[in-house]
Image (spheres, helix red, strand yellow):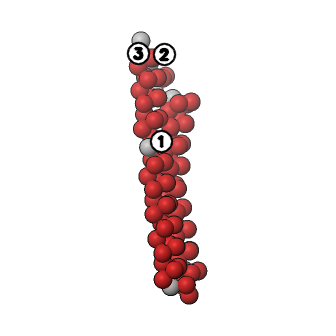
Amino acid sequence: MEKAIVLAGSAIGAGLAMIAGIGAGIGQGFAAGKGAEAVGKQPEAQGDIIKTMLLGAAVAESTGIYGLVIAIILLFVNPFIKYFM
């Protein structure tokens, strides 16, 4: 019974960890929209704007990747199961 509770908790935790992907998607969409708006206002600064936008998108994407890694660890490696075997 304890093993089933740990597996259920791990599945719920993995689902909650994947919520980080929503924030990453929203952040990247917001950055792309503001980047396009900035290039529209100042086309001569396009190179600097795109560099900054891509750096921000990479930081936002890393949050989603961290959430994915945690979800995969909870589902497949499951470090808590060894305490209940």
Residue located beneath label 3 in the image: 2
Q: Is residue 70 visible?
A: yes
Residue placed under numbered mark 1 in the picture = 18
Q: What residue type is disc 1 on?
A: Met
Compared with 49, 74 (above or below) is: above
What is the C-alpha distance between the residues marked 1 and 2? Answer: 27 Å
Please say whether residue 52 is visible from this viewpoint: no
Q: Percent position (x, y) of residue 50?
A: 56, 74
Pointers 1 and 2 in contact (C-beta within 8 Å): no
Residue at x 42%, y 34% (from the top left corner): 13
Disc 3 to disc 2, C-alpha distance: 9 Å
Which quadrant does the N terminus fall into? top left
Q: Pointer 2: what residue?
A: 85
Q: Residues within 10 Å of mark 3 (few under 14, many from 20)?
A: few
N-terminal of the pair, mark 3 or mark 1, is 3
Give the image location of residue 46, x and y in percent. Answer: 56, 81
Task: Give me the residue at 41% from left, 19% from top.
Answer: 5
Comparing labels 1 and 2, the label whose residue is closer to the camera: 1
Coordinates of residue 49 in the picture (x, y in percent): 52, 77
CB atoms at circles 3 and 2 under 8 Å apart? no
Mark 3 to mark 1: distance in Å? 24 Å
Picture coordinates of residue 38, whole percent (x, y): 48, 78
Residue at horizontal 46 percent and vertical 49 percent from the top: 22
Picture layout, residue 47 above or below residue 85: below
